[in-house]
């Protein structure tokens, strides 16, 4: 079969879908919250919105999430943090968001899943974009609940 006559599914796209599915499962099954996936054609820097459910009550509190899956995101370690590099267009997008934004990093086998709530104060400018340090201690667990009560 001549594979050049078929659409191509890249490794990057597969990792993105896998990471999003894993995180969606966590949000729905571990936290009992709602997960609103942003379809690829509408993804400009947010992969999904999670909606807080408190004792069965759907609260209307939304949190935007940007999910990055793969070991390449864990290569730059600074002390006890992973240094995430972002593009300027996403920095502007996050700064103008009316909802909190979480950046979620998942390694390839899902044994290390960390997060940070985006804040401009945590970022550092780079020649081509920006960076933010995500503490390795910020494991994705029920600790996400803390950010919803600001």
Image: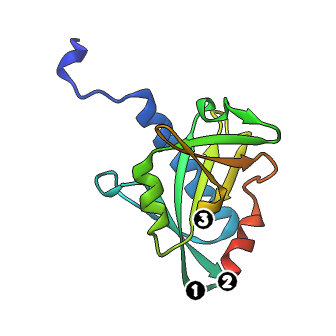
Residue situated in front as seen by the camera: 78 or 75 = 78
Q: Do the residues labelled 2 and 1 touch (CB within 8 Å)?
A: yes
Question: Pointer 1: what residue?
Answer: 59
Residue for point 54% across, 50% down: 67
Tag 1 secondary structure = strand
Residue for point 82% across, 50% down: 137
Number of the front mark, 3 or 1: 1
Q: Residue 37 carries which label?
A: none
Tag 3 secondary structure = helix
Residue 1 falls left or right of residue 63: left
Lower position in the chain sequence, tag 3 or tag 2: 3
Residue for point 65% across, 63% down: 29
Tag 2 secondary structure = strand
Lower position in the chain sequence, tag 3 or tag 1: 3
Residue 33 visible here: yes
Image quadrant where residue 74 sits = top right
C-alpha span from label 2 to label 1: 7 Å
x and y percentages locating residue 86 in the rendered image = 51, 44
Q: Quadrant of the N terminus?
A: top left
Residue situated in front as seen by the camera: 37 or 77 = 77
Lower position in the chain sequence, tag 2 or tag 1: 2
Number of the front mark, 3 or 2: 2
Question: Pointer 3: what residue?
Answer: 28
Question: Pointer 2: what residue?
Answer: 54
């Amino acid at each position: 079969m001549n594979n050049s006559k078929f659409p191509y599914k890249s490794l990057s796209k597969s990792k993105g879908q896998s990471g999003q599915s894993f995180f969606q499962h966590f949000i729905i099954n571990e936290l009992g919250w709602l997960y609103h996936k942003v379809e690829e054609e509408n993804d400009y820097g947010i992969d999904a919105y999670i909606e807080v459910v408190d004792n069965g009550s759907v609260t209307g509190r939304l949190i935007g999430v940007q999910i990055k899956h793969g070991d390449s995101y864990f290569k730059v370690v600074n002390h006890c943090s992973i240094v995430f590099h972002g593009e300027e267009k996403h920095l502007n997008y996050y700064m103008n968001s009316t909802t909190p934004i979480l950046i979620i990093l998942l390694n390839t086998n899902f044994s290390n899943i960390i997060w940070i709530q985006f804040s401009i104060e945590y970022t550092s400018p780079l020649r081509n974009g920006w960076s933010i340090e995500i503490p390795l201690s910020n494991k994705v667990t029920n600790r996400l609940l803390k950010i919803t009560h600001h």
